[in-house]
């Protein structure tokens, strides 16, 4: 039975409510349930009134679509009135409220997402979702083509749920509909598509779903030129399920163009760009080489590059352990240190810093601040025109 802090308070206020959607699906397969959404055959105004009477905070987060967020037990629970679609345009839906659980379940995308659960643990499954979940089938509720034209994001969601829950051959009706309607993906916002791509790539083994994206012609719309075989090799080597690392393995072309097209966050774009720098350490490199590399990039970046280089096996694993264990060296001089030694500010100081840093790097990043200052003094004494 799903039991998150605060759920009892919601059910005390709304005994008619059921847990709906993904939480039921995940609970049935034994996956951790971190978030719970409720459905209820009551108007949003009634939900808010009931919450107030029970002393719960109610936030009208989406009244037009019947959603109220109740704060209970220190967490928020979305409570949504049962709905039916009145009109759709491939991206948005106009809904009307209902008290019919079957009607509400019928508007959901896949059978495995159309189940609900009452407080006593009874699971309501009107479209065979539980059986599909056991069999590893991802199947649309109703006609696949009709569900896709209601919201073209369902094309990407199909691959996401196939990556996480699918086994064996995909549902034939879904494949036919996706091939016919795949261009609808072009109408979706970049943020929505990238969100689904990331969730696909976070699956323990996204390769079957990615190959299906290639076979159905969806992959060229999302990741043109993706090399699924290369990603598979990186995964076999033992790389972690990081979605940006996996994009780098698939190949994304020009990083700046990719980041702009799919609206990657600044952190995601920087991570992708850093991973694709072609400077890769090798298992035979000594600690001095590792320290030099660490002076330019943090260990996670250097480790990520080893995976992209095909680094599998004990020797590569040992390299990654060594990288993680080493403290990142920091060049110990700054401009003020050189100024104290008489080096004038400006281009001459910048050149001096670069020269001393190169000497520091060449020595394996072992020289401390005193040794670096002594090197500056030595250069000046030997006739180097650092102060001129």
Image (spheres, rainbow, N blue to C red):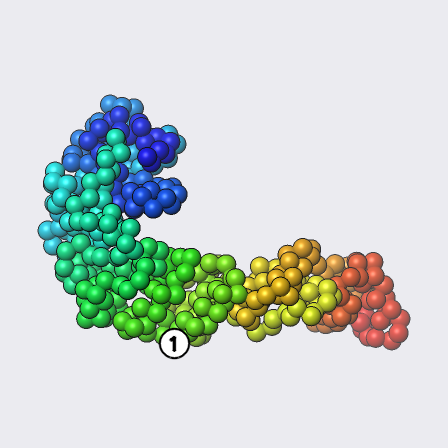
Residue, disc 1? 225
Element carrying mark 1: loop
Q: Nearer the viewer, residue 141 or 380?
A: 141
The answer to whether one can see residue 117 in this image is: yes
Q: Nearer the viewer, residue 363 or 199?
A: 199
In the visual, does 364 lie left or right of 66? right
**Residue at horizontal 11 percent and vertical 54 percent from the top:** 87
Residue 34, by quadrant, is top left
Q: Residue furthest right?
A: 381
Q: Nearer the viewer, residue 304 or 113?
A: 113
In the visual, does 33 lie left or right of 81? right
Measured from the top left, where is residue 8 in percent x and y?
Answer: 31, 28
The answer to whether one can see residue 275 in this image is: no
Measured from the top left, where is residue 129 in percent x and y?
Answer: 23, 49
In the visual, does 3 lie left or right of 140? right
**Residue at horizontal 79 percent and vertical 58 percent from the top:** 369
Q: Nearer the viewer, residue 116 or 84?
A: 116
In the visual, does 290 lie left or right of 78? right
Measured from the top left, where is residue 194 in percent x and y?
Answer: 36, 61
Badge count:
1
Q: Quadrant of the C terminus?
A: bottom right
Question: Mark 1: few, some, or many residues within 10 Å (few <14, many ≥20)?
Answer: some
Q: Quadrant of the N terminus?
A: top left
**Residue at horizontal 29 percent and vertical 46 percent from the top:** 25
Residue 223, by quadrant, is bottom left
Measured from the top left, where is residue 227 in percent x and y?
Answer: 42, 74
**Residue at horizontal 31 percent and vertical 58 percent from the top:** 166
Residue 63, by quadrant, is top left
């Amino acid at each position: 039975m799903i039991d998150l802090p605060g759920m009892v308070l919601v059910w005390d206020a709304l005994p008619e409510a059921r847990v709906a959607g993904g939480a039921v699906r995940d609970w049935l397969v034994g996956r951790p349930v971190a978030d719970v959404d409720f459905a209820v055959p009551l108007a949003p105004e009634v939900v808010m009134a009931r919450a107030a009477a029970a002393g719960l905070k109610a936030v009208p987060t989406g009244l037009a679509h019947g959603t109220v967020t109740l704060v209970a037990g220190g967490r928020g629970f979305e409570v949504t009135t049962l709905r039916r679609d009145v009109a759709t345009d491939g991206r948005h839906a106009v809904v009307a409220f209902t008290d019919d659980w079957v009607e509400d379940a019928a508007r959901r995308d896949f059978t495995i997402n159309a189940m609900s659960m009452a407080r006593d643990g009874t699971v309501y499954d009107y479209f065979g979702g539980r059986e599909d979940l056991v069999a590893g089938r991802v199947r649309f509720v109703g006609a696949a083509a009709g569900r896709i034209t209601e919201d073209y994001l369902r094309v990407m969601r199909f691959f996401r749920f196939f990556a996480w829950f699918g086994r064996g051959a995909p549902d034939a009706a879904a494949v036919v509909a996706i091939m016919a309607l795949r261009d609808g993906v072009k109408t979706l916002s970049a943020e929505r598509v990238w969100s689904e791509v990331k969730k696909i790539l976070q699956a323990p083994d996204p390769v079957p779903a990615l190959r299906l994206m290639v076979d159905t012609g969806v992959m060229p719309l999302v990741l043109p030129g993706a090399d699924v075989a290369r990603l598979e090799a990186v995964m076999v080597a033992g790389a972690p399920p990081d979605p940006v690392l996996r994009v780098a393995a698939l190949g994304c072309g020009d990083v700046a163009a990719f980041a702009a097209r799919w609206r990657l966050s600044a952190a995601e774009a920087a991570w992708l760009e850093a991973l694709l720098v072609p400077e890769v350490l090798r298992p035979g490199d000594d600690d001095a080489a590792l320290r030099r590399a660490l002076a330019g990039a943090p260990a996670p970046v250097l480790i990520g590059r080893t995976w992209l280089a095909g680094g599998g096996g004990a020797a590569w694993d040992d390299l990654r352990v060594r990288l993680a264990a080493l403290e990142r060296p920091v060049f110990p001089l700054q401009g003020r240190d050189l100024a104290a030694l008489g080096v004038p500010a400006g281009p001459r100081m910048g050149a001096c810093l670069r020269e001393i840093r190169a000497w520091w790097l060449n020595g394996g990043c072992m020289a401390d601040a005193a040794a670096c200052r002594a090197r500056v003094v030595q250069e000046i004494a030997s006739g180097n025109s650092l102060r001129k």
